[in-house]
Image (spheres, grey):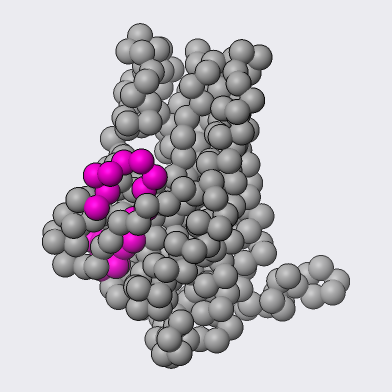
Amino acid sequence: MSDGALTKAGTWVHDNGVPSPTSTSVFDLFSLHGKTAIVTGAAAGIGLSAAEALAEVGANVAITYNTNTKAPERATEIARKFNVKCKAYQLDVASAEAVLGTVDEIVSEFNGRLDVFIANAGIPWTQGAALGGEISHYQKVVKVDLDGTYYSALAAGKHFRRQFLDKTDLRGNKLEESYSGGSFVATASISGHIVNIPQLQAAYNAAKAGVAHLCKSLAIEWIRFARVNSISPGYIATEISAFIPDDMKGVWRDKVPMGREASPNELKCAFLYFATPASSYTTGSDLIIDGGYTVG
């Protein structure tokens, strides 16, 4: 389904995608004032930084969490600091039904619209070489990291497409003239581009490679009503890597040209670029942010 973007001959219809913004102001291009965003896995780390960035430029933000119960407190802090609506929702992205239901609930509660979805929820592989790992752990990693992104895309894409076709929000209110579709951004990883050493994590690497290619594929399917991109971080100092021994982290730094891990805040502006009209001509891209790891 291309919604009229592709001809029967397999060629693209001219001027069928997101139009060029009418404003040339940098402040306008990076504004999300009055828009609605959802960020999964946003109680801490990369997701929390991304949510804060969206709120800082005016978006009302729903953040989801699975086990980190500090999320409601973080949401209250974001709302107070940036004077926007922010609310936390518990969500297991491994459940397609839960994702669909929660996204619909958020859209209904947040002014009946969805403009940005950042699929960031993920878990690490912790069992070393594939031959020594449990099948149940493999299934959980793939279910959360890859399937969860797919379920998130389906739930968000439904709203993006309806808004494009109807030009209204869920309540029937006409969208603004400058409305130019949705933005879906997923957190992939450099592990989808290279094979990490010394840690062994074949399942995680495969899942994250799948996330990046899923986004490229959806970028084509959704060309008329949404932009789809991914970000591939390198080694980031977050809670997800807390189980890694310090000596192994030292090996990581030996392999990073910049010699260190990144702070989650060093990713927030990349998410902001993809989320806003600033990236109106960018879709199907995967942005590597790794301190030079993959070129060193």
Residue positioned 43% across, 32% down in the render: 234
Q: How many marks?
A: 0
State the image coordinates of residue 280 (x, y, percent, origin top left).
47, 67
Residue closest to the far top: 247
- Whether residue 227 is visible here, answered yes or no, is no
Q: Is residue 197 above or below residue 63?
A: above
Q: Position of residue 4 (x, y in %)?
A: 72, 78
The image shows residue 154 at horizontal and vertical percentages of: 59, 61
Residue shown at the point (67%, 64%) measured from the top left: 221
> Is 149 above or below relative to 205?
below
Q: Nearer the viewer, residue 135 or 74?
A: 135
Give coordinates of residue 153: x percent, y percent: 56, 58
Question: Residue shown at 44%/83% (left/top)?
Answer: 169
Q: Nearer the viewer, residue 49 or 76?
A: 76
Q: Is residue 199 visible?
A: yes
Among all residues in the image, which is located at the extreme left?
80
In which quadrant of the rendered view does residue 61 lie? Answer: bottom left
Which stretch is magenta?
55-72
Side of 73 relative to 282 (left or right):
left
Look at 28% across and 61% down and name the residue there: 87
Task: Give the answer, above or below, for where 23 lies relative to 128.
Answer: below
Assess whether residue 199 is covered by the magenta stretch: no
Q: Is residue 287 above or below residue 251?
A: below
- Quadrant of the snapshot with the N terminus: bottom right
